[in-house]
Amino acid sequence: MHGRPRPLVARTRERHQQIHERIERGDSLRAIARELRLSRGTVLRFARAADVEQLLVAATHRPSMIDDYRLYLHHRWMEGCTNAAALTREIQQLGYRGDVNTVRRHLRPYRSGTIPADAPLPHLTVRRVTGWIMRRPEQLTETERKCLDELCEHSPALATTAQYARRLAAMVRERRSEHLALDVWLADVRLDGQRELRTLAAGLRRDPAAVLAALTTTFTSGAVEGNVTRIKLLKRQMYGRANFDLLRRRILLSP
């Protein structure tokens, strides 16, 4: 079982009840957040969920560091490698940052004989699906491609959004110089794109010169942004301790 323990479920139910009781008596979200010592975003998320079961799905199936390696572990187990320590070392070479205990917990059902008939699918999150869409199609594994195709089949809106996102990503990666490609993309999004894409397109139209420069040149503001971050760090380190002259010297002399 790959869920969270029962205490998290109990706490989720309790918070949902507390928040909705206060909403019914007329308390504001800000007052509820202050009374329960929760962030306003957390209170808003609970307030929007009319049924606590909506929250429990997220609470008991949170992403784990091992999610990206479930498929690999499944294949290695089926090949006969059942040593958790050895498997941990293998996936650590692939980027896994957890410890062997997480791998042992994941393999526990395998040891008890409940081996899945099919290879486990990746845990779906917004970040993971976005990554599948933005990566080059040839870089996706067969499982990732299958999952994305199934999601697009069930959601025509996602399929359309993925198509537009990939077209824009191709323009950025390949730095296409033809201005017509961007104009066509903006016109297509205006016709049948989702609201969020239309908002993005409207923002791009407000500064076309900067957008075209980003698509056609190799210049970047990365170095400037890095120096701005460095200066802000120095400024916060000295807050209330010295004057502008010392700040200037530190900025000029710091590496």
Image (spheres, helix red, strand yellow):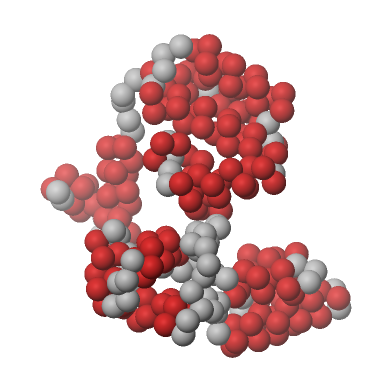
Residue 210 visible in rendering: no
Above or below — where is 94 with respect to 35? above
User: Along the line of sight, which residue is nearer the eye, 185 or 162?
Assistant: 162
Q: Give me the residue at 21% from left, 47% from top.
A: 251
Above or below — where is 66 with respect to 221? below
Q: Quadrant of residue 124?
A: bottom right
Residue 169 image point, x, y percent: 47, 31
| Label total for image | 0
Q: Give me the residue at 32% from left, 30% from top.
A: 220
User: Along the line of sight, which residue is nearer the eye, 162 or 31?
Assistant: 162
Left or right of 22 in this view: 69? left
Q: Quadrant of residue 139?
A: top left
Q: Residue furthest right?
A: 25
Q: In which quarter of the image is residue 8?
A: bottom right
Residue 242 image point, x, y percent: 25, 60
Residue 79 image point, x, y percent: 33, 66
User: Along the line of sight, which residue is nearer the eye, 29 or 144?
Assistant: 144
